[in-house]
Image (cartoon, helix red, strand yellow):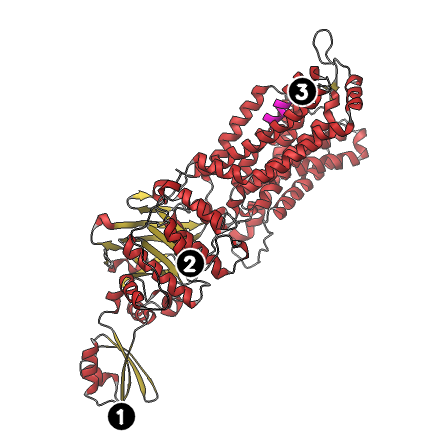
Amino acid sequence: MSSANFWRNAERDDIMALQLQTDRRKSGAFHRKSGLWWTFGRQFADLRSLIAIFVFLFLLVMPIAMLILGREIFTGLANRYTLPYHDAEGMSVTYLLGKPLLFNFAFVPFHLMMITVSSVAVLIMGGSLFRPLYHRETVDFEWSLPLTKSQWFLGRALALVAGLSVVYLVNIVATSGIVYAWGLNELLGDYLFAYLKTYLSTIVFAWFSLVIFSLAGRLFDAIILNIMIHLAFPLTLLIPFLIGDINRQSSIHKLVWLFAPAFDTYRGIVADRSILYYVILIIFWFVFGWFCAMKRPAEWGGRKTGTMLWFPFVQPVFSVAGGIVAGNLFYALDFANVLHGQTKLLRPSFIIGAILGAFLGQLVSSAIMGKSLQRVQGDEPGKARRHPVLCEWLWSLLGVAILYVVELLCQVI
Amino acid sequence: MTNNLTVERQQNEWANSSIATTPTADDQTVIVADNLSKHFGATKALDKVNCKIGGASIFGLIGSNGAGKSTFLRLVAGVYRSTEGSMLYRGQVVFDNPSAKKDIIFVADQPYFHFDNLRKMSALYRSLYERWDQELYQELIRIFPIREDQRLDLLSKGMHRQAALILAIAARPRLLLMDEAFDGLDPVMRQNLKRVLARQVTDDGMTTLIASQNLRELEDFCDHVGLLHEGGLLFVEELDKLRLGLVKAQVAFREEVSSEKLMEMGLEILRFSARGSLVEILSRNTEMELRTILNQVNPLLLDVLPLTLEEVFIYELSRKSYVVSELLA
């Protein structure tokens, strides 16, 4: 029976009486043209609760904490750390980790807490905005809406930046108001400059996170991968530093901070980065994030990140980090090293540690990202038997190779 | 209802698992899949599918689990990008094209609601789809009894689907895509949905594409049906044309009568199955011819039975040497 016949028969049927209204009033008056600003408006509206929560948390760790501390203690603290903290030539006289501090030390504890909260804000707000990417039903709904992919991604990315901007703005207005009311307004100029750098650095982290949100298959994977990358890169500097290798300031070592923008935010409090540095990074991560977002297929939603084609190319990062950490720890535990003038890279303890650490780094990252170990049967064809060694463990060995190349380059540069 | 779709089988394409449907007028063509393929890694969900669907009609897409029905719908909806070939809606590529997508609504097998009640969801749809009809929406929430302020996340599976259908139909899309449209609906609501859909097709010129595993759900109101199997479109046919010339009868003979004898008498028997004294015959004759021939052997009982879509498909597909049990769920 055709649909027309079906309907004609249905009219005769008395199970349900449908009132036909063929000439309906159209509701074009409600319609608003969908596009980038429609997406942005909708996402920003959805983000209101989280913005309110993070405004409160920012206020809690900064202006409210300052109020709890009290004017006298804060002023005493500010005066203790040289007020004014510039010398006659205008040079900073307060240093942190060997770098001149950009503002009065009294702000530092509050500022550090605020940066930590802002990193959490990027992950939580970003996760909330990009969550629809990771479930088939939400992908079906969102990607069948009359929007382009770029409108979908940019609308969300802009909502994230706008949300962070609101949080940062409310916080600095409240903080400035308190500092001004306490008569410490001469501290504000320098602090506002550092605050701007921190804000820009947070935006860098937000765009960096967009890359990971675009590449990951599940929200859990996206957040954990972001955290893992942030732990892996600084560990390659921190562990050798802790065992006494203090010469970790080469150009290559500085590149590490490019891939750990959340930690780089903490460095905004010292005179180490220019505004231009942050602007360039914002543009770079924005373009890269947008590219990844455009290339992301809908079918990635819900897939284990470890099973994706791009994942093996990221895994050497974890092998390098594991190799450096374990290599240095093994080297530190080997007291015989003291007697040798040999370079660390050639010591057996370091080599064994680096190889074990690289394998461990790959295993841990595989396990967390859902890339399961494969049991290979003896009767499988030769190609499959070689598979784990050639296609999987090769990445660990590549990680060790990268580790050595980087370390050697660092010694040369 | 205007019927713009006629089907032209490409006999030589059977081996390649693809078929083309050709509309009578090109300007009425709504969907064109041209050598459409979608691969997920090594898995070929759809492989070189060619079809044209046009006009105000209801098109049923059937197939077993993993046949590629949902993938096909997602390609039409612009959710997926095709690996090869193209999917066009009224001559435009659908993927990443809002001007094509504003005419299309996809009701997935698991509906998703961005907001927690119908009032907010209807506001979202109203702002997205310029053909949204508030009066139709009000009428639909009377037919499908869901309150506007009811928490959608607390509703049952069937109610969820009803809510999704209310929103989709009230947006008055020119092309409505539904994956397992009747899944979870009770018989009354199924009937209501069929009527509403048929009315929208008739009055509003909407094209409806429904994917289902269940042939019986589709047989009483689809204009055309297509069968997907292992990523290929095996079969597309106009339903009325399919049934034309096929007749099924249940007969009890006084004495044993062989199928050969009946064929000699002029019956074109396609299936002859005897259970005791009761014989079921499927033949390519008119009902009149069948009755005339069988009455010559003076049967004890002669009942002409309605043909189900499943039986038509089984016959048509077995003619093409397909093992039907493998194709249908």
| Residue extent of the magenta highlight | A194-201
Decide: is B167 above or below B276.
above
Q: Is residue B57 toward the left or the right of residue A43 in the image?
A: left
Whole-Å distance between the Cαs marked 3 and 2? 61 Å
Determine the secondary structure under disc 2: helix
* Chain containing mark 1: B
Q: Amino acid at mark 3?
A: Tyr
Name the residue that disc number 2 marks: B142
Whole-Å distance between the Cαs marked 3 and 1? 106 Å
- Residue A316: which quarter of the image? top right
Observer-nearest of B263 and A118: A118
* Chain containing mark 3: A
Numbered disc in front, either 3 or 2: 2
Q: Is the residue marked by circle 2 packed among few (<14), some (14-19), or many (20+) residues within 10 Å?
A: few
Observer-nearest of B7 and B107: B107
Q: Is the residue marked by circle 3 packed among few (<14), some (14-19), or many (20+) residues within 10 Å?
A: many
* Chain containing mark 2: B
| Percent position of residue A343, x then y | 72, 28
Decide: is A141 above or below B227.
above
- The circle drawn on residue B254 is 1
| Percent position of residue B134, x then y | 38, 49
Q: Amino acid at mark 2?
A: Arg
Observer-nearest of B294 and A45: A45
Q: Main secondary structure of the magenta part?
A: helix
Within the magenta stretch, is there residue A262? no
Within the magenta stretch, is there residue A198? yes
Determine the secondary structure under disc 3: helix
Q: Amino acid at mark 1?
A: Arg
- Residue A325: which quarter of the image? top right
Whole-Å distance between the Cαs marked 2 and 1? 56 Å
Q: Can you name the residue that lies furthest to the bottom here?
A: B255
Name the residue that disc number 3 marks: A191
